[in-house]
Amino acid sequence: MDFAQLPAPSTVSAWLDMDALDHNIELVNQKTQAVKLRIATKSIRSIDVLRYIQKKTPHFIGLMSISAAESVYLLQNGFNNILCAYPTLDAQSVAQTLEYTQQGATMIWMADRIEHLRLLDEIGRQHSQNIEVCLDINMSMPLPKLYFGTKRSALMRKSDVKKLMEKAGGLSHIKLNSVMGYEAQIAGLPEYLPGKSLLTPAIKVLKNGSKKQVSRRRSSIVRWITEQWHQLDLVNGGGSGSMDFTSSQPEVTEITVGSAYYKPAYFDYMDSMNEFKPAAGFVLPITRQPEKGVVTCQGGGFIASGSIGIDKAPVIHYPTGLSFLTDEGFGEVQTPLAIDSTLIKNGNAPTIGEAVWCRHAKAGELCEHFNVLYCYRQDAQLEAEGTAYTMTTYRGEGKCFH
């Protein structure tokens, strides 16, 4: 998309490049065609966009939600196959989903501790209904002096799974029929962290080594569960940064993808995302010029979650030649930007009334700040019935999930 040809918005807003989104959808479909595909809602956070991707994804199987409350919302909006990615203690929302599963919808809950299973079993017992459960297997790679991965599930080894399943033996209203083995250290860790280039060789070695242990350990645990207990309905794995690897694993029946559709700035630093195009971001109008070499934009916070670092800050997508001030960064209500001297010398420096197009570091967090995404295609804003074409976010529907 040629941002130079787009009219400068007068307010802070979010943009969605539909051509880039289509390109990314096609790439995801190609890379994951060997398995079923589940969309990670945390990376999208818009019913409109979720439906758009679903229509263009022949092997779509369902959604991966982030909470029980969001699962209810998705079921209310017509989606009928939900896997909640994280264990929940929200008994009220879990109970709300039962009216949909009674009508044929699939709702699967994550667990890695007996406390999770007991809560789900009690809810099922109270409503005389079996509740489907997915065991979250920790795919991190513990090393003697390094833990390579994320601190999430308590289920690391076969023995951990065995102890949990033995404890769950007396629970009568849960159905353990799924396994998730999410290799976060492969799918979500960039090789090229800004300001930490010396770590790149080590990260590459660790990721390659982790692929080997994930292949061995996940398939071994899945095989053991199948042989010792019962057949699994699904084995979920992967993420945007590991599509090629995860889709090739014989034990995996479905993969979850989310960030690849928007290709946020954080994924610019990842080898496996080079073919994808930036598809979403936000635009800031220039409203002030405190001095010759600086313009100041309205708005601009939007720092991503995670460990603090330059990789969590937004990046300036257009125009080139602008940089944020290190002592101010992207501010709460305004963002001053330094203008490269070459732009000033050539008379191309941006001025008041123009706009700066940016990209957020993490995919779904963008939609937490905006009610709608303004959609563009082929260098022009889409028109629908004479009005600007937009897609509504969760926030625009009055929803916020954590």
Image (tube, rainbow, N blue to C red):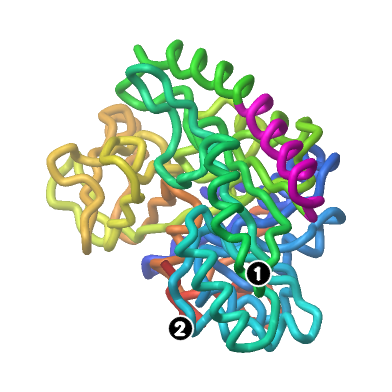
The percent position of residue 46, horizontal first and vertical second, equals 58, 69
Determine which of the numbered discs, if any, sits on residue 174 in the image: 1
Asked if 96 appears above or below 356 in the picture, the reply is below
Asked if 299 appears above or below 126 in the picture, the reply is above
Q: Residue at x 50, y 77 (%)?
A: 69
Residue type, numbered disc 1: Ile
Q: Is residue 144 left or right of residue 18?
A: left
Judge by depth and name the residue closer to the eye, 359 or 35. Answer: 35
Label 1 crowd bin: few (<14), some (14–19), many (20+), radius 10 Å: many
Q: Are marks 1 and 2 in contact (CB under 8 Å)?
A: no
Residue type, numbered disc 2: Gly
Determine which quarter of the picture holds residue 16: bottom right
Would you say residue 219 sits in the magenta stretch? yes
- What segment is highlighted magenta in the picture? 214-233
Q: Residue at x 72, y 37 (%)?
A: 224
Q: Is residue 388 left or right of residue 99?
A: left
Q: Marks 1 and 2, how far apart in space? A: 33 Å
Main SS class of the magenta portion in the image: helix
Asked if 373 appears above or below 338 in the picture, the reply is below
Q: Residue at x 79, y 59 (%)?
A: 61
Q: Is residue 133 visible?
A: yes
Q: Residue at x 51, y 43 (%)?
A: 155
Per the image, the residue denoted by label 2 is 398
